[in-house]
Amino acid sequence: MSLDNGKCIELGDIINSILPRKACIPINMLTHHTLVLGSTGSGKTHTVSVIINRIIERFDEVKTVIFDWHGEYSYLLKRKRRLVPYDLPVGITNLIEKDLYSFIDILADVLELTNSQIYILEKVLRQLLRRGGVSLSDIYTILENFVDESGWMRESRLSLLRKMSPLVRTSYSKLFSNSDIEDLIHRLNYESLPLVIDVSVIKDPFIRKIYISFVLNMIFDIFVNDKNKKPKYKLLIVLEEAQNILSKNNPVRIVSRMLSEIRKFGVGLIIISQSPSSLIENVMVNTNTKIIHSLKAGADIELVNKSIYLPPEYLRVIPYLEPGEAILYTRGFKKPLIVRIDKE
């Protein structure tokens, strides 16, 4: 177990150590994905803020993007660049023209579209592409005036219109204007501070999920598919309330793909959730670092144990960890550590 402070992030004191020692995560492990679990009030967000603050202090070559679900990181980080999603709209037209099926998949996952609704949406999009230029308002207008070929098509179309209606509301339409993810990449290239994207300003949770999914899809495309534009730095992406996009029942596929494929391109996810049993299995399998705060449900504790094989005494203590205490395990450790996270 390496505790070399030269290339690692110090988290706090090891509680189960005879001599006073600091626990730390090797910096290269962070781009191999991290899972932070714990019930409400157990200290998950504080732990992640400690990690990000330590990166700011010591590792300029690591950039960070935080999707701030509750608007908390602006207060927890010592230095940051806060953006609201309206400062960074996503280019729907560019995405549809470049990768039609990624756009459809994201809407299908978040809005829980049926096969018939997906079929109608694809027909409308192809019709618009033939005309040249696509916007959400165009999609909605065509759907409203679409000639139904049967009763099932009319029913599916009207249901699709209902699901898509929030996207074209005046308050949200500006989120999906004809911008480009290169705006974000440009900011990261020249910005040394973490970028906190405060998605809490989007009140509709479905719109929030769609926005986050579109941005993640574009980041994936830049780092994985576009070799000419791929940045040279390492990138950490913080996903709060991850059960919203990596739900066991309805995961967003592009985020699941990122877990499996993107770490070899220098991008790591920090996934934060209250319950591992609400997440897809891929999360437990593909996160090399795990930070476990207090969990109460037996099913959650059992899942953690299957993933990192905790000694019996660790299993017994998980429900009784105090706020700010956690079990830490990362690849290379001989056994998990019980840690008291530093106060900033």
Image (tube, rainbow, N blue to C red):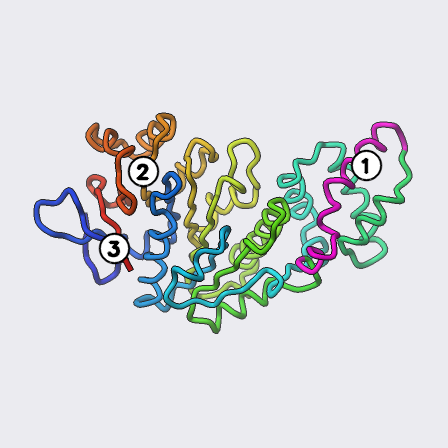
Q: Is residue 121 left or right of residue 325?
A: right
Q: Amino acid at mark 3?
A: Asp
Q: Position of residue 342 (x, y in %)?
A: 25, 55
Magenta stretch in the rendered image = 149-175
Looking at the image, the residue that sits furthest to the left is 19
Residue that badge 1 annotates:
158
Q: Is residue 147 left or right of residue 155?
A: right
Q: Residue at x 57, y 62 (%)?
A: 84
Q: Position of residue 285 (x, y in %)?
A: 39, 37
Q: Is residue 297 left or right of residue 223?
A: left
Quarter of the image holding residue 63? Answer: bottom left
Q: CA distance from mark 3 to mark 1?
A: 53 Å
Q: Residues within 10 Å of mark 2 (few under 14, many from 20)?
A: many
Residue that badge 2 annotates:
294
Q: Which mark is residue 342?
A: 3
Quarter of the image holding residue 50? Answer: bottom left
> Which mark sits nearer the N-terminus, 3 or 1?
1
